[in-house]
Image (tube, helix red, strand yellow):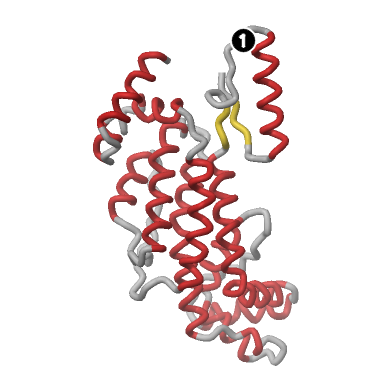
């Protein structure tokens, strides 16, 4: 039996008490082996931690979006500006504090409607102070690129028509590699990572073709990546052998995944022994 929960402290207490009860009843249940932490929630915690470092870069856009959305007249002017510039008639998306991906969607949509937003902003004296400079827009573009992979992985792990446990370890490693690349000045989201995502995702998804960064990541994004990495590793180290074994049992991945990613013979043999034991 396994129980999947988010990472709230009260759930950790529940799992500990359940383990004690199971011991008394002589039921096979262990707080380490039978507790599966919701990976989508781990991503949320990790990205939220990163976003706290990026608030100064995002707050001006958030204020602009909220002020345009708050007045119907500005909303109509935005629609007209979209029409005049041959843009799709799309609405601005606000971000929600409890959903990190809404921040990604807000940035993405705002960049898509940049010309229309600039038109509305320049012709409204109360909005002119919120006009985004080219440097600020370039930084938002990089933040969007940084968040893109988290959005893709969240989409994969939120599926309910296919099992996701076997993909957890590979996707953890993709995200950890991504943030380490950002910290280390590697400016491209690697093709190898994209191939693994395609392997574990049964549904075709549209790829974002603009994920290459011509210049190095800014220091503020690197700092955000460092915070994000710490949170990812915190929960990565709490995974158990069930994650590893499920990857072996997945016909798309098998034991070959660990060999291809150079996990080492000793660790691979340990996983194999655990598989036999389970």
Q: Is residue 118 above or below residue 230?
A: below
Q: Secondary structure at mark 1?
A: loop
Q: Is residue 276 above or below residue 117?
A: above
Q: Residue furthest front?
A: 266
Residue 275 relative to residue 152: left or right? left
Q: Residue furthest right?
A: 71
Q: Residue furthest top?
A: 26
User: Residue 200, position in %: x, y?
Assistant: 37, 39
Q: Residue at x 58, y 50 (%)?
A: 44
Q: Quadrant of the C terminus?
A: top left
Residue bearing mark 1: 27
User: Residue 242, position in %: x, y?
Assistant: 45, 26
Corner quadrant of residue 60: bottom right
User: Residue 130, position in %: x, y?
Assistant: 64, 84
Report the label total. 1
User: Residue 217, position in %: x, y?
Assistant: 41, 71
Q: Nearer the viewer, residue 67 or 76?
A: 67
Q: Residue at x 65, y 77 (%)?
A: 64
Q: Quadrant of the N terminus?
A: top right
Q: Residue at x 26, y 39 (%)?
A: 262
Corner quadrant of residue 131: bottom right
Q: Nearer the viewer, residue 58 or 156?
A: 58
């Amino acid at each position: 039996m396994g129980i999947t929960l988010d990472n709230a402290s009260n759930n950790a207490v529940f799992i500990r008490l359940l383990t004690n009860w199971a011991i008394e009843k002589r039921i096979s249940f262990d707080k380490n082996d039978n507790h599966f932490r919701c990976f989508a929630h781990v991503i949320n915690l990790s990205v939220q931690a990163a976003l706290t470092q990026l608030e100064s870069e995002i707050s001006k856009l958030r204020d602009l979006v909220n002020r345009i959305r708050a007045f119907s007249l500005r909303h109509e002017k935005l629609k007209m500006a979209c029409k005049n510039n041959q843009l799709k008639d799309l609405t601005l998306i606000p971000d929600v504090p409890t959903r990190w991906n809404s921040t990604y969607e807000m940035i993405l949509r705002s960049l898509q409607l940049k010309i229309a937003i600039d038109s509305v902003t320049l012709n409204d004296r109360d909005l002119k102070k919120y006009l985004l400079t080219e440097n600020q827009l370039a930084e938002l573009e990089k933040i969007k690129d940084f968040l893109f992979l988290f959005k893709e992985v969240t989409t994969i792990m939120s599926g309910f028509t296919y099992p996701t446990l076997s993909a957890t370890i590979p996707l953890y490693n993709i995200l950890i590699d991504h943030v380490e690349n950002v910290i280390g000045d590697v400016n491209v989201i690697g093709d190898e990572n994209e191939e693994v995502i395609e392997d574990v995702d049964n549904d075709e998804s549209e790829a974002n073709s603009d994920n290459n960064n011509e210049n190095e990541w800014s220091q503020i994004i690197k700092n955000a990546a460092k915070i994000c990495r710490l949170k990812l590793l915190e929960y990565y180290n709490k995974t158990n052998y069930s994650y590893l074994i499920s990857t072996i049992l997945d016909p798309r991945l098998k034991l070959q995944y660990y060999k291809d990613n150079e996990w080492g013979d000793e660790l691979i043999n340990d996983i194999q022994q655990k598989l036999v034991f389970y």
